[in-house]
Each structure stands twice: as structure tokens, then as C-alpha cells.
Amino acid sequence: MKVAVLGAGAIGAYVGAALHRAGVEVHLIARGAHLDAIRRAGVRVLSPRGDFTAHPHATDDPTEVGPVDHVFLGLKANSYAAAGPMIRPLLHETTSIIAAQNGIPWWYFHGLKGPYEGYRIESVDPEGSVTASLPLHRAVGCVVYAATEIEEPGVIRHLEGTRFSIGEPRGELTERCASFSEAAVAGGLKCPVETDLRRDIWIKLMGNIAFNPISALARATMAGICRHDGARGLVVAMMEETVEVARRVGCDPGISIERRIRGAERAGEHKTSTLQDVEKGKPLELDVLLAAVVELADLTGADVPTLRAIHAVSDLLNESLVRAS
């Protein structure tokens, strides 16, 4: 099996290192000091489950890699539309694109039976620009339940969680999912193949849609938000509105809000990816989180005043970051 990891950051490099440890031919596509460090000394993973170092091939040029069996996307979703030129050299006729993203994916209504089948979420896939880069027939969803950080270039700190749930948009059990899952498990990850990945998407989104923007606005860790009574109440309100939207598009997450908050609490003093982006002055991944759910609320008639308010102030913060970058 040959796998390219496009966007070998905290999650991508961790997955690539695990796959390489399982004997997979892995190519990490990265840049800057992180790429230089990986080329020099490999990917060093520091984990409660045991430290290890992997030495996959690393480059900033996908033409060096050529066609692969799977492209694992570690990019932020707001980079997908522009990723086409980097992805095209990696594709052959049956290459899958495994998109490890937060929020609502561009393929969400592809093959979903019901009144919204085929609906394109404009905030996620503006004018079809993401679908043009990432064709729907190649898409495999991936919901990440792992917390990792780049401690320094080439060094990944794994904090908790090893589950990477994957699944086809149409819910089939396919060979491409089975083969990737088998390799990931051999590398020490949990990688269940789900026939209803949309439920996982909403369960994960219940946390991301609340904790990510609040952490960015308040500069707070997951544990810090959970300890603060007012912030915790805000999390509950945002999750309640999100569950209502999920149900209106035909998916019941099937998990209590308190249980979801307890799951987030286990991440401890972890900084969300959105807070890490604020600290680095990078644009925020808001469209697939807040904007997408607000758009679906408009589509279905759901009342989401808390989500709208947090989206407005988060978008204002993002505008400031974009101007400064």
C-alpha cells in the first residue's frame, strides 16, 4: 500500500508515522521547518502509549511521490478548494481521498437519501470549488478522536485518543476502506469502518462547534472552558442547537450533551486547533463548523440564536486575523 499524507501537521504526521510503523509506504507532504526536521531526523512521536520515531519519505513536491492508493488529507478544510494542484499528481484511477476534517464535509448530502439528497452546502463548497478539487467518487470520510500538537518541528505530542473512524458517503463497506483500516490498526490506531459516519460527524461536531470558537475567543483550554460555569452553560446551549439541526437533516447523534462534555473534559489542558491557529495568526476553520450549521438551520427552519451570535463574533475575529496575515 502506498499512502500520501497531504498536510503532515499534528494529525497528519501522527497518522503517517503510525502507518509507516506498520510497513506502509508513506510519503509526507509538508513544508518549512517541520519538513526540514522530518527529513533530518524523522517524525518523533511522544505519547502516553509509548514514544517512537518513524522515517517516512518527506517532501514539499507531490510530483516526487506520484500516484498512490490513498491520499490522507491533514489539511484544514478551508484549504481544500486550493489543494487541487497538489492532489492531482497523487491520483490514479482508484485513489481514495481520506479527508480527516472537523465539521460538515463537502460530501455530506452525496448519496444521502431524503429531501436534501445532492444539496451542496455553499459555506463548505462555495460554487463547487471543493468538489472540483476533491471529486465525490474519491471521497472517504474520517472523523478524528485524537488530540495531538506539534511540540517542535518534527516532534508530535500525542495527548490522548487513537480513533480515526472512516466511512463511505453512501455507507458501503468497501475494499479501500477495509485496506486502510487494516493498515492503521497494525500501526497502533483504532480505525473502525462505519456504515453511518454522519452520526460520528455530528457527535464530533457537537464538541468542535462549541469548544473551538469559545477557546479561540477566550484563549482557553478545553479543561478551562469546562471548569467555568458560564462557559460551560454556553457550550450546552450551542450543543442543544446543533443537535436540533442534526435531527432536522435526518441524523440523531444519540449521545447526551453531558456525556459529550465529559468526553471533551478528558482532553485536559489541550488547546483546540482553532486556538492554536489564533496564536499563530492563521485564518480560522469556521465555515465547516459554524457557518455550515447555520446554513443548514436556514435550510431546515431551525432556531439557532446562540450559534448565530458566536458565529458573528468568531467571524469578526477571523477577519482581523486575515487582515493581519
Image (cartoon, rainbow, N blue to C red):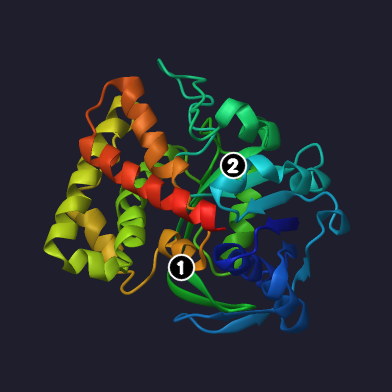
Q: Residue at x 23, y 58 (%)?
A: 261
- Mark 2 closeness class: few <14, some 14–19, many ≥20 residues within 10 Å: many
Q: Is disc 1 surrounded by few (<14), some (14 to 19) or many (20+) residues within 10 Å? A: few
Outermost residue, left side: 229
Q: Position of residue 227 (x, y in %)?
A: 17, 69
- x, y percent for residue 182: 61, 57
Using the rendered image of the protein, determine whether residue 55 is visible from the camera's viewpoint: no
Q: Find numbered disc 1 in the image and state the secondary structure of the residue it sits on.
A: helix
* Horizontal side, residue 251 vs residue 158: left or right: left
Q: Mark on residue 279?
A: 1
Instruction: Answer with the quarter of the image where residue 20 lies.
Output: bottom right
Task: Return the residue nearer the eye: 203 or 207.
Answer: 207
Up-down: is 153 above or below 104? below
Asked if the residues shown at circle 2 and circle 1 are in contact, with their CB atoms under 8 angstroms apart, the answer is no
Kind of residue sitting beneath label 2: Val
The local secondary structure at tag 2 comes to strand
Residue 249: percent from the left, percent from the top?
35, 26
Is 307 situated above or below 52? above
